[in-house]
Image (cartoon, helix red, strand yellow):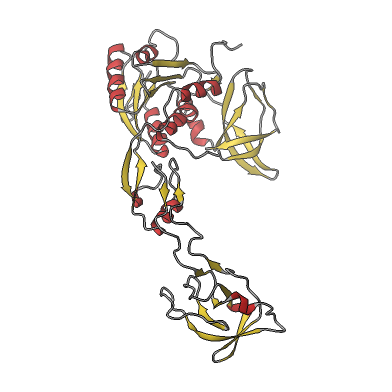
Amino acid sequence: MLDKKYLSRKEALELLLSHLEFRTIGAETLPIEEAYGRVSYEDIKAPEDLPGFERSTVDGYAVNAADTFGAKETTPAYLTLRGEIPMGEVPSFELKRGECAYIHTGGMLPPGADAVVMVEHTSLAGENLVEIFKAVSPHENVILKDEDAKKGEVVIPAGKRLKPQDIGALAGLGITHIKVVKKPKVGIILTGDEVIPHTEKVTPGKVRDINSFTLAGLIKELGGEPIKFGIVKDDYQKIKERVERAFSECDVVLITGGTSAGTKDMTARIISELGEPGILFHGVAMKPGKPIIGAVCNGKPVFGLPGHPVAVYICFELFVKPAIEKLMGLKEEKFPCKIKARLERSLHSQAGREDYVRVALERDEKGLKAIPLLSKSGLIMTLVKANGILKIPEGSLGVSKGDEVEIELI
């Protein structure tokens, strides 16, 4: 049985987020071409109507819709051709009733016109006479001057991660600079006598640094700035000095290693001395990642992460990422990309604990199948080979071969 002192993953996350202020990271102003993927700091309002004029969505004839009412193949309407509207220019004339003008897709409607008849539904009956074979209603095949955005309308709310189409919309409105949330600085500290730089040759008992590279990539993907504080041996004073330095320079601190019980377990003590309220939980009912430490010290989140690479990845996704997003003021709801697949082998789980299993996805004649990649959390290659993660809920004793399961894509 699991020790009752461990919180569930949900309880631990709620406790952590309840101690963090919303959007504590400051702002900076950037040209829009540098704002891809950044988080908007304030509501951005349209300075003008978009597109700003009534324009055609098709090639055809600009008309007053009332002049086409009743028109059909057998009894067409006849309109006088006033001329052609040049692309990119303001029409030099106004349509009178009974008149039409040839217009290209995107062209500006002349005064007096309120609709466009597609060229396919027309025919030239003479040099200056057009037959209309289909009636149109007012505003048909037309984009109104404020249909895309109205002046003063909030087009990008605060707390939105900016996509390419968002930047395109800002450009269309003539907005050149915007306020975005600064990149949160996330300090990474590795602890352990066994950890060596990735550039060194491995000797018995030593392992190369994997975690700082995984964490740095995850932080960059999230929109943060990873700052590596190096590898620290299992010496209390040295770890304390490095942690205090990172804490003073960064918005978030991640310490890997030294979170499980043992003679060299110093991370919890060091974190507890950083500020109030301090450690909120030490250990969560989940696998991998059970020995994680979550703390908030004087408003800053500090995490003691397990040393095993898979556990580090899972803990970042479940705890570190939501904490950073709250500090950044990210408001938009996230919708995980999930798919259904057929499980290729049975998996057992322990009641009261959430299990996160790496899976590889493959297709066969029956459809999509999920192949569990079972290994200890100290082995990174299962994450490299994995396409997704299968979560086994805490109330389940496992899932059976052939069951349809939900996979969250990596």
- Looking at the image, which residue is at 44% across and 32% down? 326
> In the image shown, does 129 or 272 lie closer to the viewer?
129
Total count of labels: 0
Image-based side of 299 in relation to 285, left or right: left
The residue positioned 28% from the left and 24% from the top of the image is 248
Q: In the image, is 191 to the left or to the right of 80? A: left
Q: Residue furthest top?
A: 263
Image quadrant in which you'd find residue 343: top right
* Rendered location of residue 297, percent (x, y): 37, 19
Q: In x, y percent, where is residue 199?
A: 31, 31
Q: Residue furthest bottom?
A: 126
For residue 378, say whether it is visible: no
Whole-percent x and y of residue 376? Answer: 52, 23
Tell me, yes or no, if residue 384 can be seen here.
yes
Furthest residue toward right: 74
Looking at the figure, which quarter contains the N terminus?
Answer: top right
Q: Residue at the location (48% across, 75% down)?
A: 111
Res. 79 image quadrant: bottom right
Q: Is 71 on the left-hand or right-hand side of 45?
A: right
Q: Is 11 or 360 nearer to us in this picture?
A: 11
Q: Residue at x 45, y 16 (%)?
A: 280
The front one of 190 and 248 is 248
Residue 367 placement (x, y as % from top left): 68, 44
> Height in image: 253 above or below 222?
above
